[in-house]
Amino acid sequence: MTGAVLVSLLVGLVVLIWPTDPLARIGMPGIRRAAPGRVGSGDQGGWLVVLEHAGGRPIARWLRRPTRGVRGTARLGAVEQALTVLDLVAAGLRAGVTAHRALELALAELPTDAMVRQTLERSSTQGGSEPAGWRRLSRATGAPELALVAQAWELSTRFGVPLESAVETVARVLRRSMQVRHRRDAALAGPRATMRLLTALPLAGPLCGWAFGFDPVELYAGGLLQLVVTGVGLLLLGVGWLWCRALIAKASR
């Protein structure tokens, strides 16, 4: 039984670290190398593709997923909602609706609990102008790009620039910003997955010790020396995790 467990662990480890190209050469179905120059190309995500085909899609998604806090998720959702609003406002302006009415109709299309709708409607209820509402939304979500909408609205109000053109231009800028963000997340998916996997592997040490027939408690905490070594290992593991996170965060700016 112990031998079977050990063999299974070794086979799984080989499958995870095996590069993409040899698998493609032996004809494993569905394994393809990305075209040169494309985001995420190369062998960084090869073992993730293998993991997905082996039935580990949820694990692969967790390994790939970007690390965002609650504020980062709120910012991303606010920008996506703002794009929907701007597209609807532009359509309303092309149909001859006034700017204020076009914004009201666009906000009505969002869910009632949407942050963009709540913030802009609250600002309008309190007597604030449309640019003031967009600035308030930018501060509330931590999305400085939404302040561009306020600037475009003021540009139209002060200098007579067609609001439809200004809104469409800002929408293109925001959409381009979203595309860059998605491409950056795709490019960093491989490093993030490697960081998480290499952090999780040492934590599987007790299972490996149990597979060999050792008592994990005795092996890692059976004496002063074991406790010291285990503590130093966990400390270095934590330092490595924080260091890798800092490197990825710097690359994602």
Image (cartoon, rainbow, N blue to C red):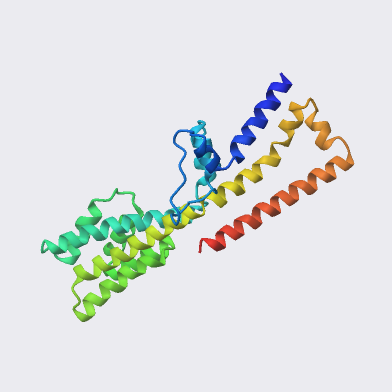
Where residue 213 sits in the image (x, y, percent)? 79, 25
* Closer to the camera in the image, 247 or 71: 247
- Place residue 101 in its image quadrant: bottom left
Extreme residue in the left direction: 96
Front residue of 37/136: it is: 37
**Residue located 46% across and 57% down the image:** 184
Res 128 seen here: no
Considering the image in quadrants, where does the N terminus appear? top right
* Residue 79, picture quadrant: bottom left
Where is residue 212 shown, x and y percent of the image? 77, 27
Horizontal arrangement in the rendering, residue 151 relative to residue 66 (left or right): left
Question: Viewer-proximal residue, 165 or 8?
Answer: 8
Q: Is residue 68 left or right of residue 237?
A: left
Q: Which residue is drawn at 52% across and 40% down?
A: 60
Where is 10 relative to 177, above or below?
above
Residue at 26% over, 77% down:
155
Q: Residue furthest front?
A: 25
Residue furthest to the bottom: 159
Towards the viewer: 30 or 76: 30
Name the residue: 67% across, 31% down: 10
Is residue 206 among the parts visible in the rendering?
yes
